[in-house]
Amino acid sequence: LQVTFIEHDGTTHLVPAPPERTLMQIAVDNGVPGILGDCGGSCSCATCHAYIDTRWADKLPTLSETETFMLEGVPEPRENSRLCCQIKMQAALDGIVVELPEVQV
Ligand code: FES
């Protein structure tokens, strides 16, 4: 399985994505800049905010109340904003494209 992360400046990172790792862990494992994951994946920092390509929208896990709440505080929320620590890699998400915001706060 693979994930493509696209930085705000257009730099693309195609990285291996082991099943059950979250998109946040995968970004950190591969040194992708732009995903910080400060809270370690407990949905309490929002420094793993990213925009998930809408082609995968119907395959993503449903937003929890906590994730929805945390996303209200990110700098540039969009319809397809998600927290990468809340999305676990699985076969249905193979090839997923994840666009990174300009900043994480
Ligand atoms: Fe903190 Fe995702 S790593 S909310």
Image (cartoon, rainbow, N blue to C red):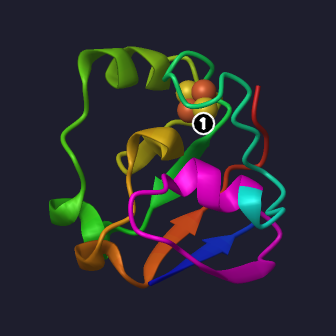
Within the magenta stretch, is there residue 97? no
Q: How many marks?
A: 1
- Residue 28 in the image, given as x and y percentages of width and height: 74, 53
- Say whether mark 1 is within 8 Å of ligand 1: no
**Vertical side of 81 occupied by 21: above or below:** below
Badge 1 crowding class, 10 Å Cα cut-off, few under 14, some 14 to 19, many 20 or more, is some
Residue at 66% from the left image edge and 22% from the top image edge: 39
Q: Is 11 colored magenta in this rendering?
A: yes
The residue located at (25%, 34%) in the rendering is: 63
- Left or right: where does residue 54 sit relative to residue 96? left
| Residue 15 percent location from the top left of the image | 65, 80
Residue 97 appears left or right of 39: left
The boundaries of the magenta stretch are 8-28
Percent position of residue 18, x then y: 49, 71
- Which residue lies under the disc numbered 1? 76
Q: Is residue 37 above or below residue 100?
A: above
Location of the C terminus by quadrant is: top right
Using the image as rendered, state which of residue 30 and residue 99 is in the foreground. Answer: 30
Q: Inspect this view and state whether residue 78 appears.
A: no
The answer to whether any part of residue 67 appears in the image is yes
Residue 82 shown left or right of residue 58 in the figure = right
Residue drawn at x 22%, y 47% is 61
Amino acid residing under circle 1: Glu
Is 17 located above or below residue 23 in the figure? below
Work out whether residue 101 or residue 66 is closer to the camera in this orientation and state it: 66
Q: Which of the four quarters of the rendered structure image does ligand 1 lie in?
A: top right
Q: Residue at x 68, y 59 (%)?
A: 27
Position of residue 56 in the picture relative to residue 19 (left or right): left
Quadrant of the drawing holding the N terminus: bottom left
Q: Position of residue 89 (x, y in %)?
A: 39, 63
